[in-house]
Image (cartoon, coloured by chain):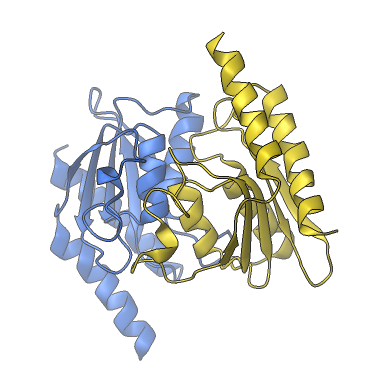
Chain colours: A blue, B yellow
Amino acid sequence: MNKQEYMLHALELAKKAAENDEVPVGAIVVNPSSGEIVSEAYNVSAHGSDATAHAEILAIQKACTELGTTRLWDMDMYVTLEPCTMCAAAISFARISHLYFGATDEKGGAVVSGVKFYEAATCHHRPVVEGGICAEQCGEILKNFFAAKRK
Amino acid sequence: MNKQEYMLHALELAKKAAENDEVPVGAIVVNPSSGEIVSEAYNVSAHGSDATAHAEILAIQKACTELGTTRLWDMDMYVTLEPCTMCAAAISFARISHLYFGATDEKGGAVVSGVKFYEAATCHHRPVVEGGICAEQCGEILKNFFAAKRK
């Protein structure tokens, strides 16, 4: 699978979040050597879980369990939305190799927006970042979700 | 219990982390109305868990489960070390009312150090912050831990 195909897979997960009335964000952890999707998750932070249950945190937790490790060296993450401050730092702690994201999040993001955590002196592992993958589709599902909320 | 007593309770948890060869940080969530300790946790991120298993994240997750909510309005957190970027943001998302911390963490902190998340435009809930509570004792256990590591 190529980058776009991985992101579209993460987008399918985001759709599941929307079906559960959760902010539609999906994330997967991929082993780029084998092409295998190691873990997948979507946001469940509004219902039934806790404030930390963003897609990226859950995907990291699942991948760590799956691989029996606390460090995801050489693993990549695909997430439909620019990670927030909490998740950007978690991705750094988990030693994710490459971070691919879809839509930019000016209000809450922390990679190219906000605190730009990977540029901070207190960031001790910086993933290689590529944003804007399937950005339009990843942003559209969020726009539709919030537009429906406002009705 | 007063602030110092709550912090010393969190410090006891940090000692448990040290006994498990984990960076000694402890955290509790307190209901200030009743004085009840709602949840307690210590860092387990190096062993047996995942990169996100910092004391604060675990204490938030446990408190959310305990109270059956995703938002800890009117709850306070006591943590022995200045929260990192991930945890500072998680504390904001969880809507913690007051954050009391012990030692300052210039290398990894994100409250009075580093990205100072609560001052960022992308931070949408700011807890009332008081640092330096039992700072010497909270810092000492960390210094001793890392000094022993270097031997």
Q: Position of residue A135 (x, y in %)?
A: 15, 60
Between B78 and B59, the one lying in front of the other is B78
Q: Does residue A21 appear anywhere in the picture?
A: yes
Q: Position of residue B54 (x, y in %)?
A: 56, 41
Between B129 and B36, the one lying in front of the other is B129
Instruction: Specify whether B65 is left or right of B112.
Output: right
Q: Residue at x 59, y 29 (%)?
A: B23
Q: In this view, does A130 lie above or below A65?
A: below
Q: Residue at x 29, y 29 (%)?
A: A31
Q: Position of residue A77 (x, y in %)?
A: 29, 40
Q: Where is residue A108 in the image (x, y as percent from the top left)?
A: 33, 64
Residue that lies at the very extreme toward the bottom in this rendered image: A151
Looking at the rendered image, the quarter that the N terminus of chain B falls into is bottom right
Residue that lies at the very extreme toward the top in this rendered image: B151
Between A42 and B40, the one lying in front of the other is B40
Looking at the rendered image, the quarter that the C terminus of chain B falls into is top right
So how many labels did they put on this image?
0
Q: Does residue A53 appear anywhere in the picture?
A: no
Q: In this view, does B74 lie above or below B136?
A: below
Instruction: Specify whether B115 is left or right of B68.
Output: left
Between A91 and A126, the one lying in front of the other is A126
Q: Which residue is drawn at 62% across and 43% down?
A: B55
Q: Residue at x 40, y 34 (%)?
A: A94
- Specify the quadrant of the image occupied by residue A104: bottom left
Q: In this view, does B82 lie above or below A150?
A: above
